[in-house]
């Protein structure tokens, strides 16, 4: 008789929560327990977690005066998420503030690899928590100072962050500020503040007011944060601030301080009693004694405010990009603010280039927006003007963006001289009549700035970027019929590569913004190489895009077009 094969019973594997409990029992037997139902319900109102345990941590084992236990928390996706530890009794709102203790007592601990055993992760997390709670006073101060911003921002008001247009460095000094919406903007000079506001779209900004920037010798710890005007004046020196006060107006003070990872800002708003209280006992309009003014400000509670840096060095690399610092002094003149030119300009702004001149006489139409930097809101506007407005608003720290809303051929002698002084000239999107005129002017000039010419082939399946240096001639790239000598695609079938618009003589190529990305990147990289002096001679680069798409459309491919999504450098053509 045949026997029926026995199907083995499935092997039961311990759940992550069971593995955590096994680890706790092995490491600290009898010193832990699961949270009770009422404890779980209360805790889940504050934290998102799936399982939680209480682990005893006797006070004799650490320096925190209140903590006698910690909570271990895991989420439903653990072990593919961090194991968190909470010390509720260490919450700074209940007792003294402690480094690396976040809101509600959650500890900020080192991240550990997720592929370690659960036993190791539990042991390391508890060990890290104990190390935090064992810090002596000197170590606690050092940690508070090292991560000053984290603790200051946790105790700051909900006021929108102030904006600083300069680095927190140098001596204490007078700076300038202006209101921008619900926040304040601070600069080294009135001109810097006004420029930022105008770039941000503020018309006729008011004259900036004076403020005080105090550069401290070391970062504050929470116990030293100013709580009233007296503490603030003592911290920064009342002799500096008093001449700047204008009672009964509030007065902002910027604090700068060094930390291990770089200098930082903090803000303090000094308040004043109402005018009726300020002048009580004094004749209206009479100047108030300085001692009385100081007492009035000193007796008021201050507001602690977060400060965001929006200066060039911070926006471009957070103080660690020397290339951006060099680019800040560069000027780029861009002729042709179409789809290619617009995206190229934005990349160069984001890289850190400080000044632009845009030249274009065309108006943006709705059908341009599918691959242009600008959108429907700018339809009907001149491309150069609208693009300058957009980039200045998005990057108000930029030195300058100057639109010339006309054709290159219509520029004045003064405007042409301004373009001649640029560090790099770019013509984006090939329009040969204009390029020939630019070429002639450059060829006849004594000073010949580097010139980048960039264009795409049909459907943007290939793109070109040519950098002309010295006496290089644009016409070396073109034949007698005005066509590029070097092409990657040719013999496109009718009504595929270039189409005619209905009812007019305009022609267009049906491709989108994504198709252009390769050529945009190609041109941007070559532009940066030119600005940073990495290309001292004429250079020609080609982008090989979607080879299969070009072949499927029926185009003939050059032998060099033997790969897709590839950048190639090719020899400069002989004259």
Image: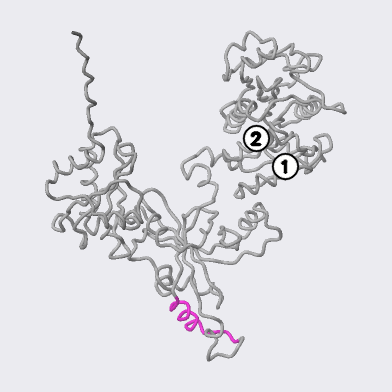
Please tell me in which quadrant of the rendered image residue 57 appears. bottom left
Q: Which residue is mark 1?
A: 376
| Residue in front for this viewpoint, 442 or 229 | 229
Image vertical order of residue 308 relative to residue 553, above or below: below
Magenta-drawn segment: 286-300
Main SS class of the magenta portion in the image: helix
288 magenta-colored:
yes
Q: x and y percent of residue 550 in the render?
A: 66, 15
The answer to which of marks 1 and 2 sits earlier in the sequence is 2
Q: Which residue is mark 2?
A: 343
Q: x and y percent of residue 392 in the render?
A: 65, 47
Please tell me in which quadrant of the rendered image residue 37 appears. bottom left
Q: Name the side, left or right, on which 38 lies relative to 559.
A: left
106 magenta-colored:
no
Kindly state the secondary structure of the residue where label 2 is placed.
helix
Q: x and y percent of residue 155 in the render?
A: 40, 62
Residue in view at x 54 percent, y 84 percent: 288
Give the number of callouts.
Answer: 2
């Amino acid at each position: 008789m045949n026997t029926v094969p026995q199907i083995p019973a499935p092997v039961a594997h311990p759940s992550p929560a069971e593995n955590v409990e096994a680890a706790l029992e092995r490491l600290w037997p009898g010193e832990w327990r699961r949270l009770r139902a009422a404890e779980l319900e209360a805790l889940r109102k504050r934290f998102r977690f799936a399982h939680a345990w209480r682990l005893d941590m006797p006070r004799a084992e650490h320096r925190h005066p209140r903590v006698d236990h910690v909570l271990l928390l895991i989420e439903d996706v653990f072990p593919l998420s961090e194991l968190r530890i909470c010390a509720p009794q260490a919450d700074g709102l209940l007792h003294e503030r402690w480094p690396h203790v976040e809101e509600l007592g959650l500890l900020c601990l080192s991240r550990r690899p997720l592929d370690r055993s659960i036993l190791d992760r539990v042991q390391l997390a508890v060990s890290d928590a104990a190390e935090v709670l064992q810090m002596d006073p000197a170590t606690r101060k050092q940690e508070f100072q090292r991560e000053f911003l984290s603790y200051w921002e946790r105790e700051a008001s909900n006021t929108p962050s102030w904006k600083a247009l300069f680095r927190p460095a140098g001596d204490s000094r007078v700076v300038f500020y202006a209101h921008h919406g619900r926040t304040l903007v601070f600069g080294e000079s009135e001109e810097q503040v006004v420029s930022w506001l105008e770039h941000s779209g503020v018309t006729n900004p008011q004259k900036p007011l004076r403020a005080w920037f105090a550069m401290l010798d070391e970062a504050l710890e929470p116990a030293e944060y100013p709580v009233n005007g007296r503490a603030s004046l003592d911290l920064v020196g009342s002799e500096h601030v008093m001449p700047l006060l204008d009672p009964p107006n509030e007065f902002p003070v910027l604090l700068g301080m060094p930390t291990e990872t770089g200098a930082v800002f903090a803000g303090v708003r000094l308040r004043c009693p109402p005018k009726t209280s300020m002048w009580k006992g004094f004749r209206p309009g009479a100047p108030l004694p300085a001692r009385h003014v100081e007492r009035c400000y000193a007796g008021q509670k201050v507001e602690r405010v977060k400060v965001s840096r929006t200066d060039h060095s911070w926006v471009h690399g957070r103080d660690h990009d020397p290339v951006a610092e060099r680019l800040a002094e560069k000027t780029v003149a861009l002729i042709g603010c179409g789809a290619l030119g617009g995206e190229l300009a934005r990349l160069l702004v984001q890289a850190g280039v400080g000044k632009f001149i845009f030249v274009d006489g065309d108006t943006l139409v709705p059908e341009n927006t599918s691959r242009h930097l600008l959108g429907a809101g700018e339809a009907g506007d001149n491309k150069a003007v609208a693009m300058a407005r957009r980039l200045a608003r998005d990057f108000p720290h930029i030195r300058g963006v100057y639109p010339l809303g006309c054709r290159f051929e219509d520029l004045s002698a003064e405007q042409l001289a301004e373009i001649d002084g640029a560090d790099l000239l770019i013509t984006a999107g090939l329009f040969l009549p204009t390029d020939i005129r630019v070429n002639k002017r450059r060829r006849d000039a004594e000073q010949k700035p580097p010139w980048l010419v960039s264009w795409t082939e049909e459907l943007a399946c290939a793109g070109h970027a040519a950098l002309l240096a010295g006496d290089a001639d644009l016409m070396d790239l073109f034949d007698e019929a005005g066509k590029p000598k070097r092409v990657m695609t040719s013999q496109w079938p009718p009504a595929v590569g270039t189409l005619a618009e209905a009812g007019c003589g305009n022609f267009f190529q049906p491709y989108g913004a994504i198709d252009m990305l390769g050529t945009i990147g190609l041109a941007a990289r070559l532009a940066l190489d030119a600005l940073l002096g990495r290309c001292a001679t004429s250079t020609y680069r080609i982008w090989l895009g979607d080879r299969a798409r070009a072949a499927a459309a029926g185009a003939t491919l050059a032998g060099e077009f033997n790969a897709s999504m590839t950048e190639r450098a090719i020899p400069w053509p002989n004259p």
